Amino acid sequence: MKQFPVAGKAITLLFTAAFLVACSGSDTKESEEAAAAAAAAAAAAAEAEQAAASAANTEIMRMQEAVSAAGNVFYFEYDSSTLTSQALQALDAHAALLKSNERTVRLEGHTDERGTREYNMALGERRANAVRDYMAGSGVANYRIETVSYGEEQAIAYGSGESNWAQNRRVELK
Amino acid sequence: MKWLAITSFNILLLAIALSARAELVIEITQGADNPTAIAVVPFAVQGSGSGIEDIAGVVQSDLHRSGQFAPVDRRDMLGLPSTKKDIFYRDWRAIETEYLLIGRVSVTDRMRIDYELYDVVRQKAVYTGAEEGPVNEARMLAHRVSDRVYESLTGIRGAFATRLLYVAVTRVPGGKDYFRLTLADSDGARPIVLLESREPVLAPAWSPDGKEIAYVSFESSRPAIYRQNLQSGAREQLTNFRGLNGAPAWSPDGKSMAMVLSKDGSPDIYLMDLASKQLQRITRHYAIDTEPTWMPDGKSLLFTSDRGGRPQIYRYDVASAQTTRLTYEGAYNARARVAQDGRNVVMVHQQNGRFHIALLDLVSDRLQILTSTELDESPSIAPNGSMLLYATKFQGRGILAAVSVDGGVKFRLPARDGDVREPAWSPYMGR
């Protein structure tokens, strides 16, 4: 939430200008000139801060758009917890946005139906951990990331065959 | 046994019989080569017996399901004797019956079943027995009759008077599935839902005395291991660690539980002392170590590990703390369960990309594939070691199936609705 500190600074500046006006001497003309100058300076500063804030806002919006485009689901190959290049790109977008805020995230690891349930539970955890480790490496603090594995218990696609299985081998960021 | 407690919005702890009707349907697909012909004559009912269970019918189905018996169709019976004096052996020889079971049921406030098993060729009784118990336990009494008949004729203790745990799932596409941890008789009859949840429930396991169960529930939005008393319904949460909390396996002495936790980094096997809740970590490897199961003597455990690159079965010796690899055949061997003889080990075995149930004989070191379907998992051996239940897929649905340890007898137990999986066959119940 960077826009709040920026706005705060602008308000501080305005108060300072008002204080200068109130404390100026008896020479009305001088004080008027000083007040006008201070007001102009304050206005300029506020404008600059606003511009910066709006730039920051634009940057956050850009990151949010990148995250929406990347999606919240990252897919894996069979019996693998290696992040695909697509997943890495998506995670870069998420990490960039997460570094701009204080949100905590939950990573849910899933597998397809092949293999035993408890082994898949461990494999789902491996996948969630792979995502967590990559995000931590990108600067998102570990304590902000919770991982839970559901193994094969929460399938997206119920049927068998690779087209269904591929949809189920995933980590969901929530 | 009717109790109910709402513990949260997500789950319902209950023990209400759904109906007398089984949720599971039995379809026998393959019997033994030379099944024994046995006639189970409808038992005579004495006393206020209207509307009671067809005891002989239950016994006949039990024997049929074992695959080792070919019961005589009732319509082929030339007489319906219920006492010795009414038996005409030539009638039974005429329809090639080898054994004849007759009996009498008397119902007062309790039920008593008296029965005799006759050898038709030798024309003499080979077993005489009686079972007694509450009327509402009629089916269990019938299963005890089956146990006695089975033991007299095969020399192997029967396992019909046992129970099953399984997980039934109702799919909700695009939403959260319903999970129901269910308890039923060994023939699927009398199902009772023990826990209903919108979050996954899995890994049901029995205590060695058959009085308690353990399982994993995600009801807190994370996995946790629970134990539950079947009589009182009392439930206790045993673990709530960060990471995996899975695969509970009661030790044969009932005092500790093996489980999988990943709280220290990677999934490892731990032992929890159930009295003190003290944990002892018994594997320490960066690989996946999971699916612990006990050898019947309690001196060692088997578990699955991919420390060699692919999942294989390993054995951990408690006294020496040594681990040795047990399986070498095939690229995927996982989730072992051991028969009470300590010799037959069943597991999930991958061959040509398909997952089958295989049996490893620890004495001959021979591995035999028992099933031919392709997504077979969760094998559970009957306490007498004769058959095993497992989960598989059939026509797109999760079903239970059974196969004898020699692969000769097979039957399916699909649910009437939804999917069923993770069967856990109980130990012998106390008599």
Image (cartoon, coloured by chain):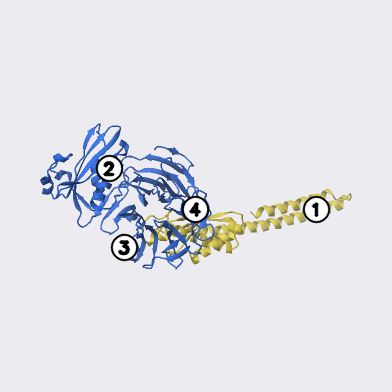
Chain colours: A yellow, B blue
Given the image, on which type of amino acid does mark 4 rest? Met
* Residue at image mark 2: B142
User: From the image, which quarter does the C terminus of chain B lie in?
Assistant: top left
Left or right: residue B12 versus residue A28 is left
* Residue at image mark 4: B272
The first of marks 2 and 3 along the sequence is 2
Q: Evaluate if marks 3 and 1 touch, with contact meaning CB atoms under 8 Å apart.
A: no
Given the image, on which type of amino acid does mark 3 rest? Ile
Q: Evaluate if marks 2 and 4 touch, with contact meaning CB atoms under 8 Å apart.
A: no
Work out whether residue A37 can be spotted.
yes
- Give the chain letter at badge 2: B
Q: CA distance from mark 3 to mark 1?
A: 93 Å
Q: Residues within 10 Å of mark 2 (few under 14, many from 20)?
A: many
Given the image, on which type of amino acid does mark 2 rest? Ala
- Give the chain letter at badge 3: B
Residue A30, placed above or below residue B50: below
Q: Evaluate if marks 4 and 1 touch, with contact meaning CB atoms under 8 Å apart.
A: no
Q: CA distance from mark 4 to mark 1?
A: 77 Å
* Residue at image mark 3: B369
Q: CA distance from mark 2 to mark 4?
A: 38 Å
